Image (cartoon, rainbow, N blue to C red):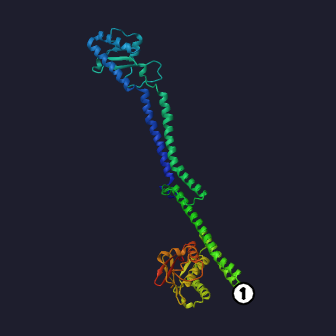
Amino acid sequence: MSKLLRRLPGRHSVFWKLALLLVGFCLLMIWLSWTWSRYAEKRNAYLSDEARFTLSEYAAQAERAWVAGQQAGVDTWLQQIGRSESGWVGVIGGDLQSLSSYPLSDVERQHMTFLRGLDWPVSRRSVTTPWLKVPFPTDPSAGSLVIELPKRFVPGRYLLVWRVLINGVIPGAFTLLLCVGLYRLLIQPLNHLRAQANAWRADQLGHRLSSQMINRQDELGELGRAFDQMAERLHSTVIVQQQLLRDMSHELRTPLSRLRVACEIEQSLPALRGRLGREVDGMQRLVDDTLQLAWLDTERQQLPMEEIQVLTLWEMLAENACFESGWPAAQLQCDLDADCWVRGHLNTLAQALENILRNAIRHSPPQGIVSLHGRRDGAFWLIWLDDQGGGVDPRELERIFAPFTRLDGSRPGNGGFGLGLSIARNSLALQGGTLWAENIMGGLRLNMRLLAKH
């Protein structure tokens, strides 16, 4: 039973909406069929209100004629009623004898053995027209009106119309309403999704679904939100790629211009070779970093994770940084313990931490201190790197992670293309980590939140 309950869809599922719609439709059709069938039966098997009123009025007139003039009064009334009714009309007493001067024939006496009341059903299968007995309204024991039912009062004249209405028109109308409900429930959201896909095909990547669609709590709402997230991801990826191409083109123009000038002016061959080497190395670093950033921005495959001791990784990176920058090891400090183990991808984590460290050295004074600290935070390790570069404008704390961003006015320095922090943030994001910046006294702090070892 518990397995069955687990397999049932959630309470906001389209399944329950469809079930409610279809069950409600079936119950409504059953109720309408029963109600309208009874109504049609009453209209087609029983006398109408008009017929009952007219026949009751005839009985009242016959009673007044009997009270006023006995047989003579009844004879006069029968002659009058005969002008308006073509069928047989008579007035009989309680002993089934005629109250007029006209005696009953054998055929008429035979009819007297089975007379219908006003409230009796009238069968359409009968070959002959039914005869009705309507007692006097004031004194029923004194007599009754007997009349062959006039043709205009015979029920069931519109039986075919009622059958078409009940068995065709009404079910068809409610089936059409069911189709409208199914269309609004299923087809209309799919049309929104189709319009979204057509907008993408027309390169309208900024097109989004309506709030009515994405606020749905069922599977179609989840699909709509997935479409919107996919559109947002695709749009942002295209924008980043276009921006990278524009920035890379801009960054390449400067070294190419310097190479053109170097080739045009007269200088020694060794100097020209040195210039060419430096410019080519710089352009290669630019291309490599840009391609790596583009890969990190589009890559969503889960990287293989392993357990990494941050202290060991720091010692290796600090040694390389001291060699490249000429800083003494005493200026690169670390107070992490040997129990600081995180889960991540070694190469991408090493590159992210290396970029952060190079950025800190580049923007710190020659005698500055760059220090690494950390503490356990539940299932994560919070690690931060402090420099003494003077910090950045608080409004620029997020913009420093954008590609090709160099805040030379706020943090003086040279070298680099403004890609290091972007690569670091994307590298950490691929392994479940985050990176953000904050100002501290006299410098900038870059915070890393990494998954801790199990």
- Taking 36 as reference, is 238 above or below it? below
**At x 26% / y 13%, what residue is drawn?**
68
Q: Is residue 300 visible?
A: no
- Where residue 154 appears, x then y in whole percent? 43, 22
Residue occupying the far front of the picture: 265
Q: Position of residue 412 (x, y in %)?
A: 54, 83
Q: Nearer the viewer, residue 193 or 60?
A: 193
The C terminus: image quadrant: bottom right
Q: Quadrant of residue 104?
A: top left
Vertical side of 288 occupied by 100: above or below: above
Residue 452 x %, y % = 53, 77
> Which residue does the image show at 45% across and 38% down from the upper left?
32
Please identify the residue farthest to the right as the structure is shown: 269
Q: Position of residue 368 (x, y in %)?
A: 52, 88
Indicate the secondary structure of the residue bearing disc 1: loop
Q: Is residue 184 above or below residue 202?
A: above
Q: Report which residue position mark 1 lands on.
A: 268
Count of marks overlaid on the render: 1
**95 or 424, which is in the foreground?**
424
Q: What residue do we see at 55% from left, 60% from top? A: 206
Residue 69 in sight: yes
Mark 1, other Cα within 10 Å: few <14 / some 14–19 / many ≥20? few
Q: Amino acid at mark 1?
A: Ser
